[in-house]
Amino acid sequence: MSKQPSPWDPPPSGGGRWLPWLIMMAVVLGLVGLLLWRYPQALYGHEDWSRLIYLLLLFVLISGGFFGARRLNIGKAARYAAIWLGIGLVLMLGYSYRQELQTIGQRLLGEVVPHQGTPAGARALSFRADQSGHFSIEAWVNGTPVRFLVDTGATAIVLTRADAERIGIDPAALSFTRFAHTANGIVRTAPIRLGDLAIGGLRLEGLPAMVNEGELGQSLLGMAFLDRLRSYEVRDGVLTLRW
């Protein structure tokens, strides 16, 4: 009984072993060209083109070494080509629609983590109220994340002593020369100025703020922040910021 050739037998002499690889390369390059023709906006600049060329060269090197070391029969090569084409198609579609997928991811994240916010159109974010009916917003202050409570009754942006330390301000070096009326009575505050405050695509620089000397449970975003926006509104338990 004659022995059936194995798909993994050592490669024969000659160039026949490269035929499946050449076919696969032609199909992959054709697919890339088709996607670029269908979605010309997918590559915006030199950096995107460089990344695409790098990935194609990496794929050529890896697949070329694989086919050069082993001999595959046509059926096996076709199955592998179909797998690679499927992976390539998913990656290319994902890259072409990366902005849409990023928006979807932000919306999902906003539903799971309300203080992150969800896009509500161009230059707008929305935040859902928590169980107590309050709105929490995570902002990046001087490059550090800080969780704020939105308080329309507060005139200023107020930081707790702990949050002030986290963004690089030493409360011990501040002058607590001002006074504020709170639910717990009158407390002393120290005026400061923030380097920058960013929430999503919104970024404000040089905002005046206060550091609370007392036991403030959470930092507050008051009217000093809200007045810098184009508009804000609360409707059906959702706070929408527009800038």
Image (cartoon, helix red, strand yellow):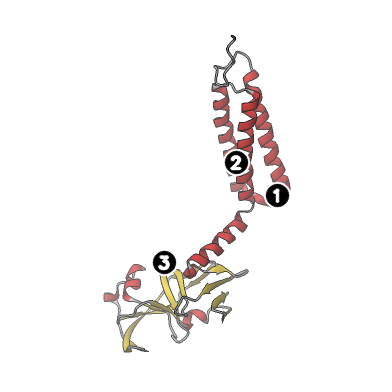
Tell me which amino acid carries mark 2. Ile
Q: Residue furthest front?
A: 1
Can residue 21 be spotted in the picture? Answer: no
Q: Which residue is mark 2?
A: 87
Q: Which residue is mark 1?
A: 40
Mark 3 Cα shell of 10 Å, populated few (<14), some (14-19), many (≥20): some
Q: Residue furthest top?
A: 1
Residue drawn 52% across the image and 67% down it: 111
Image x and y of residue 13, in percent = 60, 13
Mark 2 Cα shell of 10 Å, populated few (<14), some (14-19), many (≥20): few
Tell me which amino acid carries mark 1. Pro
Q: Which residue is mark 3?
A: 145
Assign a secondary structure to mark 2: helix
**On the picture, is 41 further left or further right than 217?**
right
Residue drawn 63% across the image and 32% down it: 79
Residue drawn 45% across the image and 70% down it: 138
**On the picture, is 154 further left or further right than 30?**
left
Quarter placement of the C terminus: bottom right
Quarter placement of the N terminus: top right
Tell me which amino acid carries mark 3. Pro
In the image shown, does 62 or 53 lie closer to the viewer?
62
Image x and y of residue 91, in percent = 60, 45
Mark toward the start of the polypeptide (1 vs 3): 1
Instruction: Determine whether 155 is above or below 95 in the image.
Output: below
